Each structure stands twice: as C-alpha cells, then as structure tokens.
C-alpha cells in the first residue's frame, strides 16, 4: 500500500500581538517628536557635525541612484543626502512629515507608525538611523521592514552604544543634544538577534564616531582613523550594521543559471586538455572563456585545437592585449554571457571538480560572492611555499579587518559572482580605479563596497603538474602591502 503524500501547509507564524501599553507609549512619543520637530528647524550648533558624519557614512554604504526607504525619516535630510532614484521616508510625527515634504519636495514622505509599515513595494536599500533605540517593539518593526525587501535589498541601521548613555544624558540636560524619552539600550548582539528573528542576516558591523563634535583636526583623526582601531573602537558612539535577507528567503528566487568559467592561461599548454576533461557542466549550461596572455609554449594554438576537438563544449578564445591576470579576468568577464561568472586557474591547483560548490553557494543564497580558500585543509607538499603561506595568513587578517567580513584567503584564484553584481561592481570601479594586477582585490574590494555577502569555500589545494607559477613572492608581496594601505584609505578610513 502506498502511503499518502504529506500535505504541504504554509509555515506557521505568530499573529502580531498589540500590547495595550503600546498605545500610550506611541502617544507620548508622537507628542515628544512634535515638539522636537520645531527645535530641529533651528540651526543645530552642537549636533550638526554628528549628522554630517552619519550622512557621510551612509553615502559610503549606499550607492546613489537606488530606491531607498528610510524608517524614522524626521525632516528627510539623511534620505536626501543619499541622492536616491526613488526616496520614501516614513515617520509617525505629522510635524516631521510636513517639514520633510517642504524641505525635500522631490522625495515622498508618508505619515505612518513603523510598527504598521505597509507600503506594498520593495526597495534596494532600507535605512533606520538612530531609530531602534526609540521603538516599542524592535522585532515587529524589523519584520515589517523585511516585507519591503527583495532578494538583493540591504538594510542599514545605526544605534547608540550603551557606553554613551551617561554622556548623552548630560549633553541633553545642558541643551547640547536632542532630548529623548527613556530609550532602549541595545547591544550589537541584541540587534543581530532581532534581525535574525526577522529573517535578516548581518553581513557587516562597523563602529563609528568616537568624537561627535566638529573640532578639526581632532574630529577627523578620531572618527576616520582611531575609531577603526582597537582599543578606541570600544568607545564608539554608534554601531552601524548592514544586513540582507537570509538565504532561506532568497533560495529559489532565481531559475537555474548559466555559468561562464573564465580561464586565464599563460604558458599552460600542458593543462589545456585536462581543463576540458575535468571541468563539469554547471547549472543550466557552461561556457568556457579562455583568455591567452602571450605564452611562449603554444598555449593559444593548443587551446584552439582543443576547442575544435570538443565541439560539444561552448567555448570562446580571446587574445589578451594587456598584462596580468587581473586584465585577463576583466577581458573574460566582459565577453562572458553566463548569469554566474567564475574563474578557474589554468594551473589546476584548484580542482575543477570543486566548481559546482561555488555555484551552489550563490544559487542557494548562502553567499553573494564565493571566495575559494586554500588555507583550511592540509595542502600538497609543493603546492605553496612556506613564505607564501605566511604572507597569505598575514593578508587574510588584514583584509578581514578591512572588509568587515571574514576572508581567510585573498589570493585563491577561484571566485564566483552573479553577473548583475559584477556589472554593478564595474559601474562603481572608478571609486577604486585600475589598481590591481591580480584581479582578486578588484573583485573583493568591489564586493565589499556593494555590501555583498562574501563567504569562503575551503578547497584542497594541489601541486602543479605542468609549468611554473607566475607569482613572485617578493615583488608581488610588496604590491599586496600597498593594496592593504590603498584599501584602508578607500574602504576603512572613510
């Protein structure tokens, strides 16, 4: 007897509970912010620098030209500073909403309580600046926010550190800071857990604003540099978190993708046939894009012959005019047609059989950017020299600090990214410029700037079976050190 198939039911969710005390809490808040709105129309002498600094931080994290929703928008100044293509602000104070509409008529402002937020549309970016400290039910608001997310939305929020409760109360009593009713004092762990309960995953945490007054050069030294370093970061005024929809809610949002595998090949003739034999079919179809870089061992001709011998494979062969692997990867990606772009080193030290894991990471929603990692499992005896290994470990610590995300191996050649994310990276490449001969850091820095979720994929690193490495440990190590300094200026010390 065949058992009946299980009946599929919609996942159960708890009904929203409205605490009777929430009503009086809201009335008191609305009255308070009505009064604050009048004071905010006057020039802000002491808090002006703090708000300018916040706007600078948000502009770094939120590219211009996006659709942006701000929850708790007040007079709309922060929303306007982000130059959104479509900007919507919500606030429960009629006075705040009216003032915002007058100041920023090109933006839309809606009078509503965040606990009942229901705009029936999604946004690229949703921001909550200095809001969660003042909410009755943070989880309920974040759950409402989640309903306005698409799979690519980024939620950015900042909130006061409890360390500053006493200094802020003194500043408020002296009339130097905006007065507040009793606040929630939340830790980073508290807010991360509340985001998780709302199906949002934290991908970046930054500590910002050590000295909230505009006293140059002290304010620049404290807020651009010292606050990013231990132990000074422990005294930061505000925590900034960037979150995205969790992989459970993203998975299945896309159909099976076509995959382009870019192979930069210079003096790798002896590996070409193995590339064809060992590279599996991926997703809805695989495109092999070879970029030959001026070899002395007939690599171009060998690839050309292999393509002719394998008509069943979808292949392209490009001749590199520039120099370096980074230039080759950019050329290959520019001609690739797949919805996922990945790189395979022609030396095959990263086994091509591992490529399906990279694709699964992206398709499942576990990551936006899959980064191969050679430093977890034991590697073959000759796969990496000792000094190269030590250098990789140093740079992994440096780049984890720089990117606000754990990155253990910065130089593993195999990476994977959605093509639409790569296109956005290219559109923003001018922020960094053409600085990277390897190609790895152009992708890593760009992914971090776009707030993509970067996730390491441990792989078994193998010995070369043909040819010699094109990496020079000393000259390239010096280049890497310069990139750390460069990235610190462009990503960390903003």
Image (cartoon, rainbow, N blue to C red):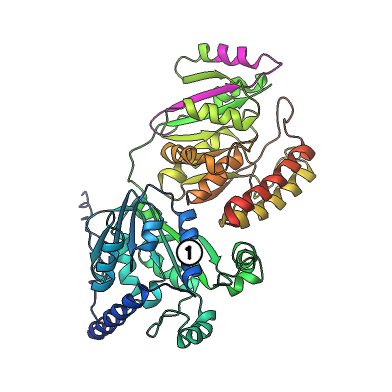
Q: Is residue 59 above or below residue 34?
A: above
* Residue 242 horizontal side relative to residue 24, left or right: right
Task: Work out whether residue 245 can be spotted.
Answer: no
- Residue at position x 46%, y 88% in the image: 173
Near-viewer residue (121 or 259): 121
Vertical order, 282 against 364 (above or below): above
Tag count: 1
Residue 16 within the segment the image draws in magenta: no
Answer whether residue 200 is visible to the viewer in this image: yes
Q: Magenta segment range?
A: 283-306
Instruction: Indicate left or right for 391 with 258 as reference.
Output: right
Quarter-of-image position of residue 128: bottom left
Q: In the image, residue 9 lies at what x, y percent?
A: 21, 58
Residue drawn at x 59%, y 56% is 492
Whole-percent x and y of residue 230? Answer: 66, 68
Whether 295 is among the magenta residues is: yes
Answer with left or right where residue 255 lies relative to residue 342. Answer: left
Q: Residues within 10 Å of mark 1 (few under 14, many from 20)?
A: some
Q: Is residue 105 left or right of residue 262?
A: left
Disc 1, SS: helix
User: Which residue lies at the image location 50% right of the left edge and 19% below the top edge?
Assistant: 316
For label 1, the residue is: 52
What is the x, y in percent for residue 312?
44, 17
On screen, residue 431 above or below 60: above
Depth check: 426 or 276 in front? 426
- Picture quarter with the C terminus: bottom right
**Pick the front one: 218 or 367:** 218
Please name whichever residue, 8 or 70, is drawn nearer the observer in this view of the structure: 70
Task: Tell me residue 402's x, y (percent).
Answer: 61, 55
Residue situated furthest front in the rendering: 43
Asked if residue 211 is positioned above or below residue 461 in the image, the reply reads below
């Amino acid at each position: 007897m065949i058992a009946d198939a299980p009946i599929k039911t919609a996942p159960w969710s708890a009904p929203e509970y409205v605490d009777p005390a929430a009503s009086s809490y809201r009335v008191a808040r609305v009255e308070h912010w009505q009064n604050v709105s009048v004071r905010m129309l006057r020039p802000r002498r002491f808090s002006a620098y703090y708000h300018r600094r916040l706007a600078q931080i948000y502009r770094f994290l939120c590219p211009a030209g996006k659709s942006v929703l701000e929850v708790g928008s007040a007079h709309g100044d922060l929303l306007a500073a982000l130059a959104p293509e479509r900007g919507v602000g919500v606030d429960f104070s009629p006075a705040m909403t009216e003032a915002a509409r007058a100041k920023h008529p090109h933006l839309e402002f809606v009078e509503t309580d965040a606990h009942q937020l229901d705009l029936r549309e999604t946004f690229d970016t949703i921001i909550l600046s200095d809001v969660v400290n003042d909410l009755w039910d943070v989880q309920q608001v974040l759950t409402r926010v989640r309903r306005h997310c698409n799979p690519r939305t980024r939620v950015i929020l900042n909130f006061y550190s409890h360390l500053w409760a006493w200094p802020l109360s003194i500043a408020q009593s002296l009339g130097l800071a905006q007065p507040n009713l009793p606040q929630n004092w939340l830790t980073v762990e508290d807010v991360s857990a509340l985001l998780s309960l709302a199906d949002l995953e934290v991908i970046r945490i930054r500590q910002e604003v050590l000295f909230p007054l505009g006293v140059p050069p002290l304010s620049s030294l404290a807020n651009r540099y010292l606050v990013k370093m231990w132990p000074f970061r422990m005294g930061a005024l505000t925590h900034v978190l960037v979150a995205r929809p969790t992989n459970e809610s993203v998975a299945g949002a896309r159909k099976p993708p076509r995959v382009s595998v870019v192979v930069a090949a210079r003096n790798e003739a002896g590996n070409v046939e193995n590339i064809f034999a060992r590279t599996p079919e991926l997703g809805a179809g695989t495109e092999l894009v070879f970029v030959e870089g001026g070899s002395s061992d007939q690599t171009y001709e060998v690839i050309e012959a292999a393509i002719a011998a394998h008509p069943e494979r979808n292949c392209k062969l490009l001749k590199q005019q520039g120099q370096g692997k980074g230039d080759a990867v950019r050329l290959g990606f520019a001609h690739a047609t797949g919805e996922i772009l990945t790189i395979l080193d022609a030396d095959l030290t990263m086994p091509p059989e591992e490529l399906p894991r990279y694709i699964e990471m992206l398709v499942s929603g576990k990551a936006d950017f899959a980064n191969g990692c050679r430093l977890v499992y034991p590697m073959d005896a000759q796969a990496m020299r000792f000094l190269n290994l030590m250098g990789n470990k140093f740079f992994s610590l440096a780049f984890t600090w720089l990117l606000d995300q754990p990155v253990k191996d910065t130089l593993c050649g195999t990476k994977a990214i959605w093509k639409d994310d790569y296109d956005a990276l290219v559109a923003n490449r001018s922020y960094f410029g053409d600085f990277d001969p390897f190609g790895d850091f152009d992708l890593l820095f760009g992914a971090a700037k776009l707030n993509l979720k970067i996730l390491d994929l441990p792989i078994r690193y193998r010995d070369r079976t043909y040819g010699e490495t094109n990496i020079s440990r000393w000259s390239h190590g010096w280049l890497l050190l310069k990139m750390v300094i460069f990235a610190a200026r462009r990503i960390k010390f903003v």
